[in-house]
């Protein structure tokens, strides 16, 4: 029996872990990489397994960085069951359909361009049909019910308190008289978040995988975040400004509606109009209303008292594009919650274009902004943006209220680990950038006395020999090497970068070289081999009409230029 780390190693997206027991293979999460182009490029060859050989998928929650490659898996031959909490199944329905639309539109846009240039068309990562096929494979489970996934593997889901339906998963594995319990935290929710119950955790495990998104941070208290939001809204109202909030459509949006409704009920803020501008967020809110069994005490009480916690009294829903445009004609102050949590697309980008140049406005970030996203650029204080080909000055006040995050901070993660009655043999730190991951690992060692470390991409661990896992020589799984079709898709992805095509290709070629070097330094089989690179170069050359020599020279140069060990995974 063994465990392979196929994604979300030393980075926050792309969750994907494989457990093998005898000839059975169980995948926990199947997430999309999001953010930097070099991460997103991985999606085409990710996670590098033969999907027809996987027997079951377990899904911790509906966020795309955990679920977004499920239709891709189905497109590539996966036919087994996909187990998830009932609310996760309903949310995945909305999110995967929306995601297929985006992938199809991207591919269509690119294909049109390429047809005009007389080049081959590109395939989307997956399409609507793959989503339909995936949805037919979902199986609904509830919290705390134990069920058999495959012979020799039982699972139990417990409330992770992160988004509706989110779960931590324990796998009980038995093989040849040997038993192991592996616990996957999934994403762990924030303490005292409204709507959902507190994260529950498990009491026993031999090995634990825990997320570390905010492993280096301590959130401000719920009272402080409330106070800050109240002050921002009151200030904006006094100055006829707008409060623009990019919000993740699932979770954060409903939490904001809940808190805004409560502040209105208590006259803590004036009766300012609130716009929810996102058909998907509206649909996700309806899914929440269908799952009261997931709510905490306070939310149930509010509903029982006749109040709808997701519908503040000044709320207007914008479904159509016209309704969305009308919001920009609004002269007076308003709160605008729009989809596109990291501002990478969606209606939020239009509101930013119309709002960031006015000093009376606020842009309030309430969620994690990944490296490489427009959200991150605005958050770190960039004063000029290019939106829809126009240069826009940022004069609005930009602020972040991290504690609205749906993720536990370091203290919350340590509390979740404290629930174990006996120290697990090992704690694997995943789903976090390298620094927060290392900081969490240090605290786990120091405060809890557990063995903890961050695994590398592709690393494989023998579950029968957990005592020695931290000192054992690292093993890596052999993943499928990319074929010509993968390469074409990767090239297509890179070429989506438009005007920066050439530099992206250069970066990409350099990256291939670094990846191989890093594999050699680590003493393991690289995911890409020299022959693959040669083949890739040929395709790249074809795609960019450049000659092979130039590309090979670029690769050699970028290899030379990069003398430090890369941040693998
Ligand atoms: Zn999540």
Image (cartoon, helix red, strand yellow):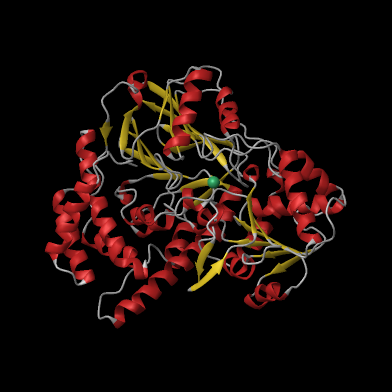
* Image quadrant occupied by the N terminus: top left
* Image quadrant occupied by the C terminus: top left
Q: Position of residue 301 (x, y in %)?
A: 82, 43
Q: Position of residue 240 (x, y in %)?
A: 77, 65
Residue beneath the point at 74% across and 64% down:
241
Residue beneath the point at 59% across and 63% down:
394
Q: Tell me which corner region of the image, top left, top right, bottom left or bottom right, holds residue 545.
A: bottom left
Above or below 194: residue 539: below
Q: Tell me which corner region of the image, top left, top right, bottom left or bottom right, holds residue 160.
A: top right
**437 left or right, relative to 256:** left
Q: Residue furthest bottom?
A: 116
Q: Position of residue 18 (x, y in %)?
A: 37, 39
Residue 490 in view, yes or no: no
Above or below 451: residue 487: below
Q: Position of residue 427 (x, y in %)?
A: 44, 26
Residue beneath the point at 26% across and 59% down:
506
Camera-side residue: 344 or 207?
344
**382 left or right, relative to 276:** left
């Amino acid at each position: 029996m063994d465990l392979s780390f196929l994604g979300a190693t030393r980075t926050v997206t792309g969750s994907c872990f494989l457990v093998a027991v005898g000839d059975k293979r169980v995948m926990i999460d199947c997430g999309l990489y999001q953010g930097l182009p070099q991460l997103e490029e991985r999606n085409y060859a990710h996670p590098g397994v033969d999907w027809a050989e996987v027997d079951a998928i377990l899904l911790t929650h509906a966020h795309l960085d955990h679920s977004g490659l499920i239709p891709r898996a189905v497109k590539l031959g996966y036919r087994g069951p996909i187990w998830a909490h009932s609310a996760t199944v309903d949310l995945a329905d909305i999110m995967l359909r929306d995601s297929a639309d985006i992938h199809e539109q991207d591919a269509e846009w690119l294909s049109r361009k390429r047809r005009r240039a007389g080049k081959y068309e590109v395939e989307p990562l997956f399409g609507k049909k793959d989503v339909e096929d995936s949805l037919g494979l979902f199986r609904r489970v509830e919290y705390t019910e134990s069920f058999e996934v495959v012979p020799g593997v039982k699972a139990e889901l417990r409330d992770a308190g992160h988004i509706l339906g989110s779960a931590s998963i324990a796998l009980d594995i038995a093989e040849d008289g040997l038993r192991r319990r592996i616990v996957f935290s999934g994403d762990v929710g924030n303490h005292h978040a409204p709507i959902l119950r507190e994260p529950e955790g498990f009491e026993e495990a031999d090995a634990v995988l825990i997320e570390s998104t905010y492993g280096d941070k301590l959130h401000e208290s719920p009272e402080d975040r409330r106070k800050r939001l109240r002050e921002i809204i009151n200030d904006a109202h006094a100055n006829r400004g707008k409060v623009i909030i990019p919000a993740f459509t699932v979770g954060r949006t409903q939490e904001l509606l809940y808190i805004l409704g409560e502040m209105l009920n208590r006259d803590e803020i004036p009766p300012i109009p609130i716009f929810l501008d996102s058909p998907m967020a509206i649909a996700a809110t309806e899914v929440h209303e269908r799952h009261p069994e997931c709510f905490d005490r306070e939310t149930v009480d509010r509903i029982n008292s006749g109040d709808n916690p997701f519908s503040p009294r000044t709320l207007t829903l914008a479904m159509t594009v016209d309704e969305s445009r009308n919001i920009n004609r609004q002269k007076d102050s308003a709160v605008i919650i729009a989809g596109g949590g990291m501002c990478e697309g969606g209606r939020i980008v239009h509101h930013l274009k119309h709002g960031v140049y006015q000093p009376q406005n606020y842009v309030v970030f309430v969620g994690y902004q990944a490296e490489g996203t427009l959200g991150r650029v605005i958050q770190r204080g960039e004063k000029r943006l290019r939106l829809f080909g126009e240069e826009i000055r940022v004069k609005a006040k930009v602020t972040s209220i991290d504690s609205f995050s749906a993720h536990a901070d370091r203290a919350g993660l340590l509390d979740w680990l404290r629930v174990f009655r006996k120290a697990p043999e090992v704690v694997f730190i995943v789903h976090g950038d390298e620094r927060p991951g290392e900081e969490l690992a240090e605290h786990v060692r120091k405060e809890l006395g557990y063995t903890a470390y961050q695994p590398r991409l592709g690393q494989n661990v023998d579950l029968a020999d957990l005592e020695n896992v931290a000192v054992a020589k690292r093993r890596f799984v052999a993943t499928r090497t990319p074929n010509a079709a993968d390469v074409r898709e990767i090239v297509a992805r890179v070429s989506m970068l438009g005007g920066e095509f050439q530099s992206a290709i250069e970066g990409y070629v350099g990256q291939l070289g670094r990846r191989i070097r890093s594999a050699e330094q680590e003493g393991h089989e690289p995911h890409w081999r020299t022959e693959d690179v040669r083949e890739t170069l040929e395709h790249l050359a074809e795609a960019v009409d450049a000659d092979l020599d130039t590309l090979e020279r670029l690769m050699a140069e970028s290899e030379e230029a990069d003398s430090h060990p890369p941040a693998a995974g």
